[in-house]
Image (tube, rainbow, N blue to C red):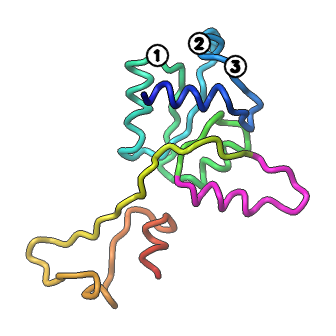
Amino acid sequence: MFRARFLSHLRTSHFTSQRSFSSTTARAANSDPLRIGFVPEHFSTPLHFATSNYGLNASLVPYPSGTGHMVQALKEKELDVGIGLTEGWVAGLGKVGKGEEKPYQFVGTYVETPLCWAISAGKESKLKGVEDLKGKKIGVSRIGRYIHRSMMN
């Protein structure tokens, strides 16, 4: 299911690098692997699975620094496809100047369910709810990422 859906997106899409694919067979015949950028999180597992078990001819390029870095790589044609948080891609398009050509486009949805973030505290913690966090220091995985910005509100 994943492979068919993913390859369907590739067959019907045109990316910034000007590579387009008319069929799975044509893609397989192309010796250059598709360069796919991704943020290394559990959501990327199907990409690894597709390359190792279903013959997806792809070079998986991790971007631990996040979607913003991938936006730049796609603009600079270092990638053919980028998979990341929608807000990062929208922000990148929002920075395109008036009259400038958009450097990329949306071609599909990778994760269809909303992201659910957990707020965790040690088992001995006196924190019992979100309201107990007001005025406290909180650790986040990466400064400037979605979770950091959402905690600021």
Residue at image position (38%, 62%) is 141
Give the residue type at disc 3. Ser
Q: Going by the image, does 122 lie left or right of 42?
A: left
The one nearer the camera, 86 or 71, is 86
| Measured Cα–Cα span from mark 3 to mark 2 | 11 Å
**Helix, strand or loop for disc 2:** helix
Residue at image position (42%, 28%) is 1
Residue at image position (42%, 76%) is 151
Q: Residue 50: which quarter of the image?
A: top left
Closer to the N terminus: mark 2 or mark 1?
2
Label 2 close to label 1 by CB (< 8 Å): yes
Give how far across and how far down residue 84 sits, in percent. 53, 49
Q: Which residues are magenta?
A: 85-103
Residue at image position (8%, 76%) is 124
Tell me the residue that label 1 is attached to.
55
Give how far across and how far down residue 23 sits, in percent. 64, 17
Label 3 close to label 2 by CB (< 8 Å): no
Tell me the residue that label 2 is attached to.
28
Q: Residue 11: which quarter of the image?
A: top right
Tell me the residue that label 3 is attached to.
22
Give the residue type at disc 1. Gly
The nearer-to-camera label among 1 and 3 is 3
